[in-house]
Amino acid sequence: MDKQLNHSSEFSVPSVSSCSKLESIRLKRGLHAIERPFFYRICILGFAALFLAGCATNRSSPTNSPANQMAKHLRLKKQEKIEINYLLFLPKGYEASAQKRRPLILFLHGAGERGTNVWKVATHGPPKNVTSKPDFPFILVSPQCAEGQIWSNDQLLALLNEVIGTYAVDKSRVYLTGLSMGGYGTWSLGLSYPELFAAIAPICGGGEFISPFLSSRDKPEALRSLGIWAFHGAKDPVVPLVESERMVELSKKLGVKEARLTVYPEAGHDAWTETYKNPDLYEWLLEHKRLPAKK
């Protein structure tokens, strides 16, 4: 082979198996002298890099991807405009600048009070009662649900945050109550965000399983320490008594320490008149405080 290279100005690339024997052979053809082993090493390293890059590309794409399914990702920037009418009652002697913080009740009305006339909200419950009882010791927030809608947790949270940030509210004593459709709203909001409330009082309402179940996993201590006192009429033709029974039993199974149900034996759907005129309810609420979450 050495003889052939000396005879001709052209050269042929030897096989890789002969590379180890070419330590002293140099290429000639007007080029600077380059060690052949170095040349081959460069070639081999280049081929290896290309091979590894190809392997990496193949590994990034699953070979068993179905032909009729693709992985996609959606990212949207959504700005929601929230508008809600509500009645606000401030207790006698309230001063926003004072150091004294007041307990707050968020009241959710029933389906019959939906609309745009916010004064319909005062048809039943606490917003009706405070018109004749100015010594009511709570800040009372009574929003109105729009016609054709049901209570939205997002809207209620936005309203609650606004009120707490604006008025002298004792954050450890925030309570939630509602009747009929508002009873459903109370179960939903209260069990989805138990960390916000010290106690809730749903009246002739009901609810679903997933919200309290997720709270029992994600916020177990907040759910366990939430006070629950439900009320229902035994002869309710609109929302069956079993709805409140089921929710109270579920709350107990998920670890709520205090979940009780009062049933009025002769009452129909109106279980709220008797409940909201009972001073024991408000005393019971004030017995509960939301302690800071344990870290």
Image (spheres, grey):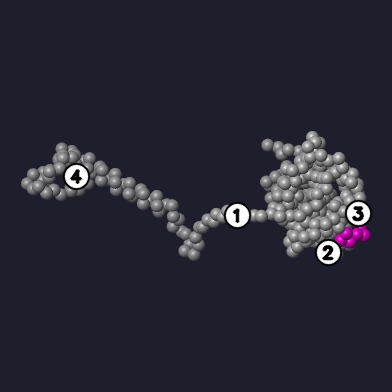
Q: Of the residues under marks 2 and 3, which one precedes in the sequence?
A: 2
Q: Residue type at mark 3?
A: Glu
Residue at 40% in and 50% down: 56
Foreground residue among 29 and 17: 29
Q: Which residue is mark 2?
A: 238
For residue 63, side relative to residue 137 (left or right): left
Q: Which residue is mark 3?
A: 274
Kind of element beneath mark 3: helix
Q: Which residues are drawn in magenta?
A: 264-270
Kind of element beneath mark 4: helix
Nearer the camera: disc 3 or disc 4: 3
Where is residue 134 drawn, in percent x and y?
Answer: 89, 46
Q: Which residue is mark 4?
A: 18
Q: In 3D space, how far apart are the residues under numbered discs 1 and 2 (Cα atoms)?
A: 38 Å
- Please say if 254 is above or below 102: below
Local crowd at mark 4 within 10 Å, few (<14), some, or many (≥20)?
few
- Please say if 244 is above or below 166: below
Number of numbered discs present? 4
Where is residue 32 drawn, in percent x and y?
Answer: 16, 40
Residue at 83% in and 48% down: 89
Q: In 3D space, how far apart are the residues under numbered discs 4 and 1 (Cα atoms)?
A: 68 Å
Where is residue 14 drawn, in percent x and y?
Answer: 18, 47
